Image (cartoon, rainbow, N blue to C red):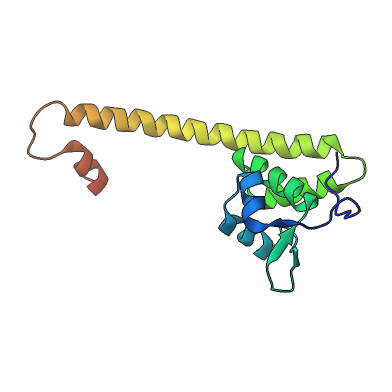
Amino acid sequence: MAITNSRDDDSPSLPIGELSRRTRCNIETIRFYEKIAVLPRPARTEGGHRIYGAFHQRRLTFIRRARELGFTLDEVRALLRLAAARDVPCTEVKDLAATHLAEVKTKIADLRAMQKALTTLIAQCNAGDQPNCPLIETLLGGA
């Protein structure tokens, strides 16, 4: 299902709090996404309150899920453009996701290296009551 801005089935009726509850997205995050134009600005009541429709809910759910997978906001924008296309070009989506996966794998490798280094330093700290803590010394650049 493409995420289009068709408002035929979308009579705005959701206040921001309800949109937040339905999408599990913080109200401030919703406002931020509007500010950076990832989420279109909603209609407003005569009193100036934002009111959202089903389109906003679908789009915000898409954004939240993409962010949960670690996609950057620029990548989310690209995915939204692709999702809005009449025929979603799966090859482009696959390429974007593959690039993202490579970045995730690099981060995991970096985290494993940090884990190993911290494990070693913590073991050195547990070696006894030393006058100079090996962890502090390493952070100071002494080890």
Q: Position of residue 51 (x, y in %)?
A: 73, 61
- At x 76%, y 46%, the residue is 58
Q: Quadrant of the N terminus?
A: top right
Query: Is residue 20 at all visible to an observer of this figure?
Result: yes
Q: Position of residue 97 (x, y in %)?
A: 71, 36
Q: Is residue 135 left or right of residue 81?
A: left
- At x 10%, y 27%, the residue is 128
- At x 75%, y 63%, the residue is 42
Q: Position of residue 124 (x, y in %)?
A: 19, 29
Q: How many marks?
A: 0
Q: Is residue 74 above or below residue 121?
A: below
Relative to the observer, which residue lies in front, 7 or 77? Answer: 7
Q: Quadrant of the C terminus?
A: top left
Query: Is residue 143 at all visible to an observer of this figure?
Result: no
Which picture quadrant has residue 40? bottom right
Relative to the observer, which residue lies in front, 67 or 142? Answer: 67
Q: Is residue 79 left or right of residue 127?
A: right
- At x 69%, y 64%, the residue is 50
Relative to the observer, which residue lies in front, 40 or 43? Answer: 43
Q: Is residue 4 left or right of residue 95?
A: right
Relative to the observer, which residue lies in front, 13 or 3? Answer: 13
